[in-house]
Amino acid sequence: MNTLIKQIRSHLNLSQTEFAEQLHVTFQTVNRWENGKVVPNRLAQSKIYDFCRERAVPVYDFVINKIAQAADAVCLEDGRILLYHGSKSGIEGSIAPLSRKQCDFGGGFYMGTEPMQALTLICDYEKSKFYIISICADELEHLEVSADIEWAMLVAFNRGRMEKIKDTPFYNKYRDLTTEKDLIIGSIANDRMFYVIDNFFIGNITDTALVNSLSALQLGKQYVAVSQKGCDNVCIEREIPLSYLERLFIKDIADANRAKGSSLASEICKNYRREGKFFDEILDEVLNGEK
């Protein structure tokens, strides 16, 4: 937090005295913040947030740069790749595949290739922690799912949307697709994509619109350790706590990205509204033996 205060002040080219005057606090208060002797309380951080927003201080960029610097400092063993994970209350003890069952790829330990994926998930939680982690996919039985209709159907299965066709060969295909796998790799249905995938499931858009949205939104990938062996392969490289002030700016960016993504997806869906099949049509084809 002390580094962030210095960055904000330096960005505005203010002395500690000038910064203190503009925030209506004492010089000693700012000095103690920057020396790390005192952490600004929530009220003070809210005041700094408003102050920075009024002056367009790029605090979110400071957060991303902090993460990038921490990632650059990690020395990886051959074959390991860096990923990111957000925890609402921090990781305690051994990592296990214990997320809620109805996630994109089922229960597992979820990691992403882009910091924003994880940051978005935890920005509303006071005790949240951000992690830079590594994993070696080559050491694990893994499945990589392309950003196409196969991805959508696997997500549909894991979100419980296929119960209508339970026990059919089509259903069993997706039930068994990840059996005996340690790691699943595929596009992430983050806040920008949730609007599209949900509208596909409820019958507002076709599979063609969905697939084109997947390609256009460039969401990055998620890596999901779905077995204990996969989780044991995960190594926590850095733990990065997030201040209330940082989380406020992350939430602003997340909200803006969600709106931007939904707008783009709506336009894509409009362009492809007459092409492809609706989700219920695909399921009906299965029930009628046509698929």
Image: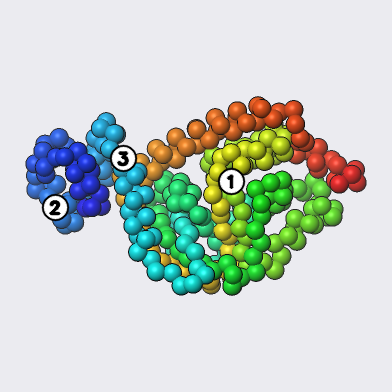
Kindly report the distance in space between the C-alpha atoms of the residues bearing marks 1 and 2. Answer: 42 Å
Q: Which SS class for mark 1?
A: loop
The answer to whether residue 114 shows anywhere in this view is: yes
Residue occupying the point 82% across, 52% down:
170
Which residue in the structure is indicated by mark 2?
32
Residue occupying the point 86% across, 46% down:
291
Farthest-out residue, front: 78
Q: Which SS class for mark 2?
A: helix
Residue occupying the point 29% across, 34% down:
56
The answer to whether residue 244 shows anywhere in this view is: no
Which residue in the structure is indicated by mark 3?
58
Image side of residue 216 versus residue 69, left or right: right
Against 257, residue 113 (above or below) is: below
Foreground label between 1 and 2: 1
Foreground label between 2 and 3: 3
Q: Disc 3 marks which amino acid?
A: Pro
Which residue in the structure is indicated by mark 1?
189
Badge 3: residue crowd in 10 Å (few <14, some 14–19, many ≥20): some
Which of these two is toward me, 41 or 253? 253
Residue occupying the point 85% across, 53% down:
168
Task: Tell me where residue 10 appears, x and y as whole percent.
Answer: 19, 44
Question: Which is more N-terminal, label 3 or label 2?
Answer: 2
